[in-house]
Image (spheres, rainbow, N blue to C red):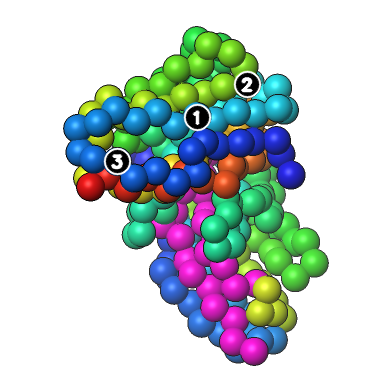
């Protein structure tokens, strides 16, 4: 299994509070991604990173920010959580830029009350 | 924008029967089409992929076909087994050359013993 660790795995929080999810990899892969998974929507890309301090927006980036200060860590922050951000969040990593396998973490289940 | 449509959303078959899942994509520049399997409580894992210069690819009981003209691709599972029960996602690469994938909505496959 690819060395990807997501934390926390489960979190319950209240509307308006900040939340940070962490993705840590031991594979030294350049590309990292944050997806959210919701019933009927599959996996939707939130943000991605193509190197340290290099990030860009995905399909559903509103309300989220990311940071990557080290190759191995990619943080996803919800500045002020809303109920619509209740979801399962997956981090993924990739070695190559185009047409390469994504390796996914185990997911972080976030509930915003 | 770029879009991937996946059908059916649920599929139930008897053990030993075949299962087919179909996807269509909108971006004519897409050139990489992976399929992921997600078991309960886990992250998705790549099971097979195909590139645009190939029309069909097979790996034991699973095969993928691609019709670039019609912009659709399909996953075929033969001689299904109970352990094939899972959620399956198709995906297509984007034209932005960043390794990003657009995923379909997912198909829940149930194989009845």
Q: How many marks?
A: 3
Q: CA distance from mark 2 to mark 1?
A: 10 Å
Q: CA distance from mark 3 to mark 1?
A: 16 Å
x, y percent for residue B41: 54, 58
Label 1 near label 3: C-beta < 8 Å? no
How packed mark 3 is, by other alpha carbons closer than 10 Å (few <14, some 14-19, many 20 or more), is some
The answer to the question of whether label 3 and label 2 lie on touching residues, with beta carbons closer than 8 A, is no
Query: Which class describes the residues within 10 Å of circle 1: few (<14), some (14-19), or many (20+)?
Result: some
* Left or right of A4 in this view: B108: left
Neighbour class for label 2 at 10 Å: few (<14), some, many (≥20)? some
What residue lies at 58% left-to-right and 54% top-to-bottom?
A: B42
Q: Could you tell me which chain the residue with mark 2 belongs to?
A: A
The residue drawn where x is 55% and y is 37% is: A6
Q: Which mark is residue A72?
A: 2
Q: Residue at x 70, y 22 (%)?
A: A28
B85 horizontally vs A47: left or right: right
Which of disc 2 and disc 3 is earlier in sequence?
A: 3
- Choose the circle earlier in sequence order: 3 or 1: 3
Residue A35 within the segment the image draws in magenta = no
- Relative image position of residue B96 (x, y in whole percent): 47, 26
For residue A22, which numbered disc appears in the image? 1
- Single out the mark in the foreground, 2 or 1: 1
For the point 29% across and 28% down, the residue is A18
Q: Tell me the chain of label 3.
A: A
Residue B52 visible? The answer is no
Q: Which contiguous range is marked in magenta?
A: B84-113
Labels 3, 1: front one: 3
> Under tag 3, what secondary structure?
strand
Q: Judging from the image, what secondary structure is the residue with disc 2 in?
A: loop
The disc label shown at residue A13, or none: 3
């Amino acid at each position: 299994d690819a060395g990807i660790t997501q934390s926390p795995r489960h979190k319950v929080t209240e509307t308006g509070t900040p939340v940070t999810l962490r993705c840590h990899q031991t594979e030294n892969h350049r590309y990292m991604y944050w997806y959210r998974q919701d019933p009927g929507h599959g996996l939707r890309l939130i943000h991605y990173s193509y190197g340290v301090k290099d990030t860009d927006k995905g399909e559903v980036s509103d309300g989220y920010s990311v940071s990557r200060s080290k190759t191995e860590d990619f943080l996803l922050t919800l500045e002020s959580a809303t109920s619509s951000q209740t979801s399962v969040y997956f981090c993924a990593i990739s070695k190559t830029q185009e047409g390469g396998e994504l390796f996914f973490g185990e997911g972080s289940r976030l509930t915003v009350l | 924008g770029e879009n991937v449509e996946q059908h059916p959303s649920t599929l139930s078959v008897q053990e030993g029967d075949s299962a087919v899942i179909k996807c269509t994509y909108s971006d004519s520049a897409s050139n990489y089409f992976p399929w992921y399997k997600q078991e309960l409580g886990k992250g998705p894992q790549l099971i097979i992929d195909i590139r645009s210069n190939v029309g069909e690819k097979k790996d034991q009981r699973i095969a993928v076909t691609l019709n670039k003209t019609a912009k659709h691709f399909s996953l075929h599972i033969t001689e299904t087994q109970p352990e094939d029960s899972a959620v399956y996602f198709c995906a297509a690469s984007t034209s932005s050359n960043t390794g990003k994938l657009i995923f379909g909505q997912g198909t829940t496959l149930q194989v009845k013993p």
